[in-house]
Amino acid sequence: MNTKIKQLTLLATAGFLLAACGQGKKEESTQATTQAQTKQATTQAQATTTAPTQTTKAAQSDANEVKTVYQLVNTNVTTKLTLYSKGNIIERTITEVITDFSVDNVPEASREAVKQSYEIQKSVLEQTYGDLKNKITELKGFKFDSKKEGDKYIQTYETDYTIVDREKLKSAYPPVVSFDDPTNLAKVKENLVQMGFKEVQ
């Protein structure tokens, strides 16, 4: 039963896997590039530091948006993570976590034990998502929804990295698992595969 609760907790945080880390690395990289360019150009410092930024923004906005979907199935929980990226930059993610509490396919001999385990899992799930929803209702760039369909509990998280304040999100939900850079497509894909996710689209 403890294993199921741990698995639930791990999967429940999957929606935040990409949203939890700070913006520090991205800002440091931009700042370091700008400082290096400023040191190289003495008389035209402003033109030198501004032009590459405009080129980068133009190249990024011209790139086509690519949709990549990953999925992880673990016991009665299915997590689907959709990444929307341009180039190697993730701009938006949608995570859907479906927890199925149906016992129809459980052998009769263990059905009662599984039902009891599911009741504890439901209670933890409802408490966790209730608390979370209260904390992040007004966080720009992050949407959260939770609903029930029959025996299924469905939670959906949407993060827009172009506007979300990652520090506020992280402080609203401290136990979040995070990547070093949630907008680096190559690194995120690598981490997802290591966690057991499979690319499905």
Image (cartoon, grey):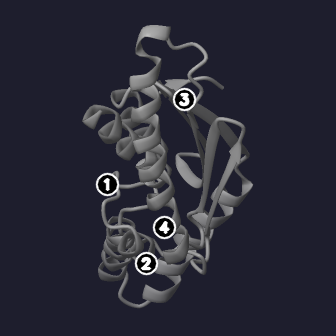
Q: Position of residue 104 (x, y in %)?
A: 61, 17
Instruction: Please name the amino acid that badge 3 sits on.
Output: Gln
| Quadrant in which the C terminus appears | top right
- Residue 21 is drawn in which quadrant? bottom left
Mark 3 burial class by Cα count in 10 Å: few <14, some 14-19, many 20+ = many
| Nearest the eye: 23 or 73 | 73
Which of the marked residues, 2 or 1, is nearer the chain's N terminus? 2
Q: Which mark is residue 180?
A: 1
Q: Which mark is residue 168?
A: 2
Mark 4 burial class by Cα count in 10 Å: few <14, some 14-19, many 20+ = some
Compute the Cα span from label 3 to label 1.
21 Å
The structure residue drawn at horizontal position 56% and vertical position 22%, both measured from the top left corner, is: 103
Instruction: Please name the amino acid that badge 4 sits on.
Output: Leu
Q: Which mark is residue 91?
A: none
Q: Is residue 121 left or right of residue 70?
A: left
Instruction: Please name the amino acid that badge 1 sits on.
Output: Asp
Q: Tell me: residue 23, above or below residue 100.
A: below
- The residue to which callout 3 is attached is 71
Q: Position of residue 193 (x, y in %)?
A: 40, 28
Compute the Cα span from label 2 to label 4.
13 Å
Q: Is residue 31 visible?
A: yes
Q: Position of residue 138 (x, y in %)?
A: 60, 81
Disc number lying in front (2 or 4): 4
Q: Tell me: residue 2, above or below residue 36.
A: above
Disc number lying in front (2 or 1): 2
Disc number lying in front (3 or 1): 3
Q: Is residue 184 visible?
A: no
- The residue to which callout 4 is attached is 132
Mark 2: which secondary structure?
helix
Mark 1: which secondary structure?
loop
Which of the marked residues, 3 or 4, is nearer the chain's N terminus? 3
| Nearest the eye: 187 or 193 | 193
